[in-house]
Image: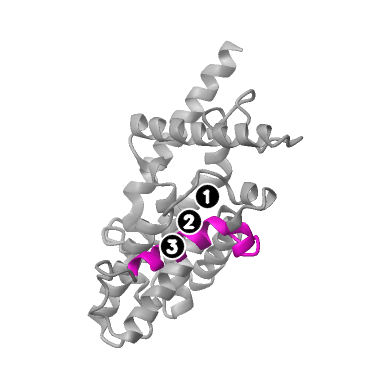
């Protein structure tokens, strides 16, 4: 948000706040709060599992992003509990603005929204002529409307949602292992329920997430982070870290193929 220049560039998202400095501060607060709560009370199963198993959250939210809908709704319910509402000093307009931004950002983390959001952001920066530039940040994208600012924040949180991809190799591997265990646990539940087809990457008797990372980087991760770097050159170090891990997975795959 700060080091990458995204909060400043997306400050137009808080169009209900007139003061420029306060507007930028509200965008930072909204981004941080969305990042904190975006997986609040996650049950460790996918939206698809919730819908197919008629989970109460899927019923409540009419099968539409039940995980993300719950994360943000439960977080705000907690926020309104006595002793937890640290945002009371905001004006009503500021709070409504912040809540709107947080809700939109968290709902955007549904992977089903990935393609649509990426394409919308790409179309936006292409139409504005934003392009990669030097380390000084020349040519960085800057939103001129609330909708543009909101879209930039959504993309940023989507990158943060998979932030372990930009960590050092060892830390990234540990998070990949944790994710794989969570996936396999869901697959076990699906088998217990007697489902004929087990969700992709979730059958422990087949290759899991750790054996499919190269494809994930090729088709999802690298395009996402490169788009962020194209619009916000100051986010370059994070993009470079993702590319380094992408290269390591390519090398791992090459070694496996050489042995096979």
Residue 237 position, x and y percent, is 32, 47
* 43 displayed left or right of 94: right
Q: Check the picture and name the quadrant holding the C terminus.
A: top right
Q: Residues within 10 Å of mark 2 (few under 14, many from 20)?
A: many
The main secondary structure of the magenta stretch is helix
CA distance separating discs 3 and 2: 31 Å
Q: Residues within 10 Å of mark 3 (few under 14, many from 20)?
A: some
Q: Look at the image and tell me whether residue 108 can be seen.
A: no
Along the viewing direction, whichever of 187 and 122 lies nearer the viewer: 187
Magenta span? 57-79
Residue projecting furthest to the top: 259
Q: Is residue 16 magenta?
A: no
Q: Nearer the viewer, residue 123 or 81?
A: 81
Q: Position of residue 143 (x, y in %)?
A: 41, 75
Element on which disc 3 rests: helix
Instruction: Give the left or right position of residue 244, taking residue 199 as reference.
Output: left
| Circles 3 and 2 in contact, beta carbons < 8 Å | no
- Residue 74 is marked as 3
Res 59 quadrant in image: bottom right
Tell me the SS state at disc 1.
helix
Q: Up-down: is 259 above or below 176? A: above
Which residue in the structure is indicated by mark 2? 227
* Residue 223 tag number: 1
Residue 139 location (% of width, % of height): 37, 66
State the image coordinates of residue 109 (x, y, percent, origin top left). 50, 57
Residue sitting at the far right: 196
C-alpha distance separating marks 3 and 1: 32 Å
Between residues 128 and 89, which one lies in front from this camera angle? 89
| Viewer-side label of 3, 2 | 3
């Amino acid at each position: 948000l700060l080091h990458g220049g995204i909060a400043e560039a997306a400050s137009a998202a808080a169009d209900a706040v007139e003061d420029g400095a306060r507007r930028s501060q509200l965008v930072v607060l909204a981004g941080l709060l969305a990042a904190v709560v975006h997986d609040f009370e996650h049950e460790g199963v996918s939206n698809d599992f919730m819908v197919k198993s008629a989970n109460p959250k899927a019923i409540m939210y009419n099968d539409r992003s039940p995980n993300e809908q719950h994360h943000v709704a439960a977080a705000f319910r907690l926020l309104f509990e006595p002793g937890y509402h640290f945002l009371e000093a905001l004006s009503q307009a500021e709070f409504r603005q912040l809540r709107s931004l947080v809700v939109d950002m968290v709902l955007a983390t549904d992977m089903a929204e990935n393609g649509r959001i990426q394409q919308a952001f790409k179309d936006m920066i292409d139409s504005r002529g934003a392009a990669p530039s030097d380390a000084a940040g020349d040519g960085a994208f800057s939103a001129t409307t609330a909708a543009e600012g909101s879209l930039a924040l959504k993309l940023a949180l989507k990158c943060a949602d998979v932030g372990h991809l930009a960590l050092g190799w060892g830390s990234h591997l540990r998070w990949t292992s944790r994710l794989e265990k969570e996936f396999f646990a869901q697959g076990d539940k699906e088998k217990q329920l007697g489902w004929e087809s087990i969700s992709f990457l979730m059958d422990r008797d087949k290759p899991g997430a750790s054996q499919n990372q190269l494809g994930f980087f090729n088709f999802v991760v690298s395009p996402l982070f490169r788009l962020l770097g194209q619009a916000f050159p100051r986010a370059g170090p994070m993009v470079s870290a993702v590319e380094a891990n992408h290269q390591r997975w390519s090398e791992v795959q090459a070694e496996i193929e050489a042995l096979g």
